[in-house]
Image (tube, rainbow, N blue to C red):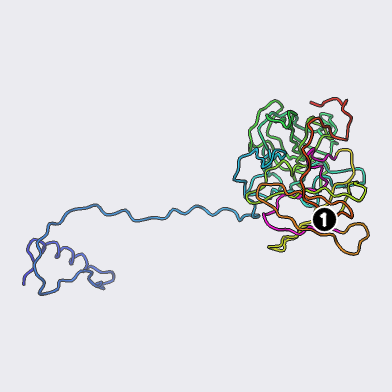
């Protein structure tokens, strides 16, 4: 049986094209005419060649430095009426941005009378420092610690202070960013959350590049600081442990190492109770002397050696995402988890009398 005359020219053209192989070798035909097949009348239509399917793969980013993830909830954030997770991290999520365990709020360094009034976040020189919340720049340059503009012996080095657009209990809030290598703002400038205000450095009294971050209220003064880990929003799926640890007389236990161990992973965290110092202030609600932020949700064992006892005292707590878990220890009475009573609003830090002159 002869092929249909209407398709014969097409077949001849196709076979002619396939016969010209490379190096004189004729490739195997992809279409063959099989004998004894019935004629099928058809009309060939011309259709455009389909566009080949392509994958568009993003350029791989840097390896993550931790399991830290930004919170899913908006900032400001508070699960209870007395919490205040008002601020974002001053360092971006793709960098180390959690406080150094050795330089937390209330630690005692370089002498018995010198306490740490913020948290230190160690990160490479030149890392951008971002505003933790919207506000107006009220200080740039040297002299913030001593409140002496231009003082190049100031331990805070190049520093920036922001007066925020919002307050707490009708009182003004400030955040401090110290030890910069370079500033990116001027006094009077308004900034938004996440805006770059400077870059990490080691100016002033430091042991290496980091940003020293403080929360102050109601005045921009060294004596009106509070623990930033109670003000920075926890990462996604993580929470904060807060404790008030006392002896039998109800006196706060100072500079005691407390071990916090994850029951799920075995990870161990060590935090120290606050030291004694006029610039250290407990939260008006929690009246704490221990804060450990950045804890993944789960069950933890809390233990420490009390006085001269042979065995550690211990209890178990559960950390919830985006929340504060609170406990107390009261000498021989041991541990408790009841939250504090409702606070009064007419409080002042114990460091200075109420007649102190407010700072700008």
Q: Quadrant of residue 156?
A: top right
Rendering coords of residue 8 (x, y %): 10, 64
Q: Which residue bears the numbered disc 1?
A: 258
Q: Residue, x 72% and y 27% (percent of image)? A: 187
From the viewer's perspective, tell me whether residue 267 is left or right of residue 206: left
Q: Is disc 1 surrounded by few (<14), some (14 to 19) or many (20+) residues within 10 Å?
A: some
Q: Is residue 122 visible?
A: no
Given residues 334 and 62, the one toward you in this image is 334
Is residue 16 visible from the viewing direction of this image? yes
In x, y percent, where is residue 222? Answer: 83, 35
- Can you give x and y, in whole percent of width and height, for residue 230 in the image? 74, 43
Kindly state the secondary structure of the residue where label 1 is placed: strand
Quadrant of the image occupied by residue 12: bottom left
Q: Name the quarter where the C terminus is drawn.
A: top right
Residue 53, image quadrant: bottom left
Q: Which residues are magenta?
A: 280-304
**Between 234 and 181, the one nearer to me in the picture:** 234
Foreground residue among 192 and 20: 192
Front one among 180 and 138 = 138
The total of numbered circles placed on residues is 1
Q: Residue at x 89, y 53 (%)?
A: 331
Quadrant (top left, top right, bottom left, bottom right) of the N terminus:
bottom left
Q: Is residue 347 magenta?
A: no
Please check the rendered image and state whether residue 296 is part of the magenta-colored stretch, yes or no.
yes
Residue 76: x and y in percent read 65, 37
């Amino acid at each position: 049986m002869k092929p249909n005359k209407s398709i014969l020219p097409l077949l001849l053209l196709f076979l002619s094209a396939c016969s010209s192989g490379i190096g004189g070798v004729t490739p195997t035909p992809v279409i063959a005419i099989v004998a004894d097949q019935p004629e099928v009348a058809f009309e060939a239509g011309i259709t455009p060649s389909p566009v080949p399917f392509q994958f568009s793969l993003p350029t791989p980013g840097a390896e993550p430095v931790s399991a830290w993830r930004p919170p899913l909830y908006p900032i400001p954030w508070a699960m209870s009426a007395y919490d205040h997770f008002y601020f974002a991290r001053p360092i971006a999520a793709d960098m180390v941005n959690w406080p150094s365990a050795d330089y937390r709020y209330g630690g005692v360094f370089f002498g018995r009378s010198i306490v740490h009034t913020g948290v230190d976040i160690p990160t490479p020189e030149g890392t951008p420092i971002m505003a933790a919340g919207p506000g107006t720049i009220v200080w740039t340059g040297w002299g913030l610690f001593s409140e002496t503009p231009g003082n190049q012996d100031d331990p805070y080095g190049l520093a920036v202070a922001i007066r925020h657009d919002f307050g707490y209990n009708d009182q003004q809030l400030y955040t401090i960013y110290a030890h910069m290598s370079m500033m990116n703002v001027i006094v009077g400038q308004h900034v938004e959350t996440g805006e770059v205000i400077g870059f990490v450095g080691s100016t002033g009294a430091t042991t290496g590049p980091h940003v020293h971050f403080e929360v102050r209220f109601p005045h921009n003064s060294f004596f009106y600081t509070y623990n930033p880990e109670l003000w920075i929003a926890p990462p996604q799926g993580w929470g904060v442990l807060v404790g008030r640890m006392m002896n039998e007389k109800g006196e706060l236990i100072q500079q005691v190492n407390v071990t916090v161990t994850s029951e799920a992973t075995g990870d161990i965290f060590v935090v120290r109770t606050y030291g004694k110092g006029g610039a250290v202030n407990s939260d008006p609600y929690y009246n704490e002397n221990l804060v450990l932020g950045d804890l993944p949700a789960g069950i933890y064992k809390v233990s420490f050696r009390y006085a001269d006892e042979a065995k550690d005292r211990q209890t178990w707590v559960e950390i919830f995402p985006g929340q504060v878990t609170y406990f107390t220890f009261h000498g021989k009475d041991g541990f408790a988890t009841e939250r504090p009573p409702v606070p009064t609003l007419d409080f002042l830090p114990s460091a200075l009398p109420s007649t102190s002159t407010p700072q700008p």
